[in-house]
Image (cartoon, rainbow, N blue to C red):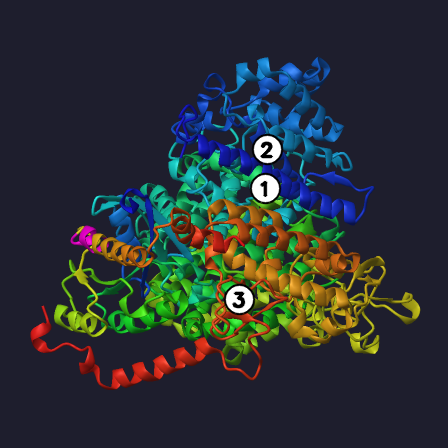
Amino acid sequence: MFRRKDDNHDRIQQTNIKRGITSHFARTLKVLQQRHLLSDVSEFIHSDDASNNLCNALEAVFLHGLKDSVAHKITAYVGLSAVTTDSTSGPNFWSVVAKFTHSDVIVQLQALSQINTNIGWCRAWIRLALNDGLMQSYLHSMIVDTKTLKYFYHSFAFLRDFEQPGILKNLLTGLMSLDFKLSYNASVLNSWNNTTLQIAGLLDSQSVPPPAISVSSTTDVSNKQIKEDSSKVTRKEEPVLISSSGVENLPVFAGVGNVVDHPSSAADVSLLSVSEGSTCSQVSCPDPGPSSTEHFTTLVKKSLPNSPASGNTEGPAFLAADSSPQDCKGGLWSSSFGQDIQAAILSRASPEIGEHVFGRATGSIVISDDTASLADSLTRPRSRRVDEDELKHYSPKDLSLFPKQEPAQAITVGRESTASSDDSFHFQNHPDEAASKGGDLSQTLADSDSVPREINYEEICANPSGKNYEEIYAHLPALRLDSMERDAILHKVLEEFDKQADKEREVRDARQAESHIDDAGATTWVSNDIATHLKAGHNEMSHYVIGQGQNAAHAPSENHTTLEASIYNTLNESADELSMSGHFGNSLSGMSGWSSDIESRKGHRAKQGHESDKGRAESFASLLRTYVPDISGRSPIVTLDQVIGSLPVTEFEDGLKSEGSSSNTKSDVAQHQDTCLEGFEVVQCADTSNFGPVNSSSRMILLFEIAREHGLSHQNFTCRGCSRPIGIIYGKPRLCEFDGGLYCYECHENNESYIPSYIVFNWDFRKRKVSKENFKFLQEFEDQALYDVELLNPKLYVHVPELDELKTLRQQLCYLKSYLFTCSQKVAGSLRQKVWPREHLYDKRDLYSVGDFLQVQSGTLQKLVKELVKFGSSHVYECALCSQKGFVCEICRNPKVIYPFEVETTLRCKTCKAVYHKTCMTESLPCPKCERWGRRVSKSSIVEDHPEDYGMSPSDKL
Amino acid sequence: MASRKKVLLKVIILGDSGVGKTSLMNQYVAKKFSNQYKATIGADFLTKEVMVDDRLVTMQIWDTAGQERFQSLGVAFYRGADGCVLVFDVTMPNTFRSLDSWRDEFLIQASPRDPENFPFVVIGNKIDLENRAVSARRAQGWCHSKGDIPYFETSAKEAINVEQAFQAVAKNAMAQESDVELCSDFPDPIKLKDDQSKPKEGCAC
């Protein structure tokens, strides 16, 4: 895990690390530049995932090769033996940069209220330097000062490398045009994040999957959460919600076993929990392999010691849970989260340990009630820290994405949590997979889910405050259908769990009523609740998934807890309210994804249709009204009983009971919703799906066909993005020429972009106005080689001579590729390097990206490919190996070797790939090699008919 | 006097994918064996200096890819080959059957001066494995039918017979070489050099 730096023999490794740092930096810089230079020059770069990536790279630059005197603490850090020291100690280059920094700046940094470690100052320094645009000059003065560098850094250090710093400095020049406004007074910065350590080679990247994969999936969640939290006073809590790349946490997690002694441990724990949720999901999504399972088991093991006492006795456990509300009130709201978290962990882990599920779940709850004990059991401050960083790192990409008004935001958050729970849902699948089944199903689920999740996100974003959640909700089922279909088998199991879940939900409601103070902050609360309810109502999906993979019986309880955790984590906004709801969360059912809920709902509709219909048909307000009194009417004792009752596996079949309770809950939910969303109409789902926001799959299709404008009536006179009314009295709608939809002025800011389909079909490079979302989408896809000219519009080759020329050139390049890639590593690498990141140039002759098309027009692409061909062919002619891999024309037998990339003079047989002179080979002439091979095949088939030819006589056998 | 000359012998190893061509070469040149299978991409060569009949000979051994998918690369290096090793896997009858095609293809692509007497050697590899499926007799029969090609049964893994097989190739190739030399009345040093370096220069044109 930890790389000893003194080793001479891993010099190559160090070189790779250094290159890695540079390339990482170049990559992130490119991302930043693309976004900020192309879109809006005047825009400031705030702390978001891209800029944090950049900072990570810079941190790695300064961290790499730090001498032991400074870095000796790493061992402790990575070893995780002492949790408390972990977060604050570790390698840092503060003493280095302090030497180069003006004392005023140092004072300024040290005065930062949230920064209290050397690492924090280092990281803040990086950000400050970027903000002030001084990074380049800092770097320069450091590189020049070899004496100081020698003192602080090993000879293999990045900064002492003879070429890398130069490259970096050049790259930094690219930063000049960017204006940073990074926040640097954040406690998150007090410890390194794993990405940095990985880049710097301090953490073994092999044991930790690259963060890149997880970014996309988590970013959304964390963004939202951060946003949500921004209203909060303390920054500390932010990180809690933001768990981003759990993948990176894995190693850390594994090591943590100590008790947390922070006063704020409760908060930490809660943070952890959140992160857990997403972490797991991340792990599972990109890499369902051993790592996730491992992680899993660790968690389980950790939590296990706590649970044995409570064992199977649900009674005490739940009592404890009941008492917790008070505790929570007194303490941090986050403490209540701890429960959820733990529960979530447990529940997630439980599939593996089927028999103990119940006992463990209860056990965890008990533990979590007591804040201190909670902290003990969880004690993962370290990982939380990391999470914070990660969160920060992947934090809001675009503030604009977030809905502006509160209720909407809450809904959004709910959505997000759904998404995250969705992830966890995957996660749950994976253990199963690893444990027993081939896991095709789960894999497919994961696959199919990833897209929908994105869609959800977009939809949510698109929804302005006024929209009711039902509408959003309505969109989801359709998107989810795919996976739903695949899950058909699971539905039966699900149904049973459904009932069970309902029961538990009821219990939870009762408890909520009990302790619920319904005052100010009602909105948040309500929205939380709604989300919770929705989830609870439909969390069955995950239930049955788990159930299927493992022991179906155990599923419900786990899910409940998990779900709760996720919901609460994401949703809770006001501390008081939060603490309450967080507490309730325990009884709530698990981690099912939003989408999965819906799915399950859909699947159920035939049988349990009345339930969901009820919830849907009524307006929010009325639902809420009925809900509140209902809750208050319940006593905690009932709750407990119910909980206990619902737990046993045997009760699954109890259709009557569960049905009754479930319908109760439904109405509760409805009532609740009603009160909070008074005045909002619930739109029927069927209607919305028709003219709803464009999802990304339909967007993808639009890349390859020119969209038609259908007019306002087709869109029901609403904006395609946010569904607000447009046209007539609401002002002129704006046409997006990419999807042909009409948008309001908020969803369509008259951004202009190239439209791929216009280019491919009309060779039309005019920029056209597109909606905000589509603009983003197009930007994102600008460099993706998606357009196969031969496939989409082969006539383009006829009409555009430049393309025709390129066709030849790229054909040559494709031929050359097979030579260069079978030559030495160095040659192959140099070709790759020259082409990167546009491998499609030599992989597929007809594939273009929008960027390529633009370059075709300007002629730069031809120039580039020409150069590549020249480079490649001159290598082949000169290389002792490559030159030998030419062909000899079988027709004229001229000993002069010919090559396929000599397209002017040679011709290649498409079937056998033999190469002939153009003058020798004519269309009418059959390819001699093909003929020969054909003869052989027929001959060998004869041989097959008489296997005794070469067959074995029994005596031959050994 | 020609015997004092340093001679370069170009030997090509052919055979189906997975029969052990690379392993044989590595065993012969580097005395190493790895159980890991890694498909050869394209073609590559190693050189080894050996003594054949008191002459120091540099063997340039070309290891080729047996896989179809590398057919997109040409086999111009067959030209000027001095010897060819045909390899099959004694546990896989079909690899033996395709020796015919390999031999034909080689003769066509290399177009040696005297195809009938071109110094081939056939190697039945992997005799260390239990599940043998091609008998020595069968293989011998085939070799005999193709003009008495020497046949060796080897195990690249256990270094059985590898040395001998390659030694035979070198020897036969040298014999062919000296035949040619004998044919030319004047062992013209310049001409000789021309002959030997031809393969290399021919490609660089």
Q: Nearer the viewer, residue A85 or A206?
A: A206
Q: Earlier in the sequence, mark 1 or mark 2?
A: 2
B166 lies left or right of A278: left
How far is mark 1 from mark 2, CA to CA? 9 Å
A333 lies left or right of A866: left
Report the amino acid beneath label 1: Leu
Pointer 3 residue: A448
The circle drawn on residue A188 is 2
* Dot 3 and dot 2 residues touching (CB under 8 Å): no
Is disc 2 surrounded by few (<14), some (14 to 19) or many (20+) residues within 10 Å? many
How far is mark 3 from mark 1, CA to CA? 26 Å
Q: Chain of mark 3?
A: A
Determine the image quadrant of residue A651: bottom left
Q: Secondary structure at mark 1?
A: helix
Report the amino acid beneath label 2: Val
How far is mark 3 from mark 2, CA to CA? 34 Å
Q: Residue furthest left?
A: A955
Q: Chain of mark 2?
A: A
Pointer 1 residue: A391
Percent position of residue B115, x then y? 32, 69
Magenta stretch, residue numbers: B160-166
Q: Is residue A121 among what the camera can see?
A: yes
Report the amino acid beneath label 3: Ser
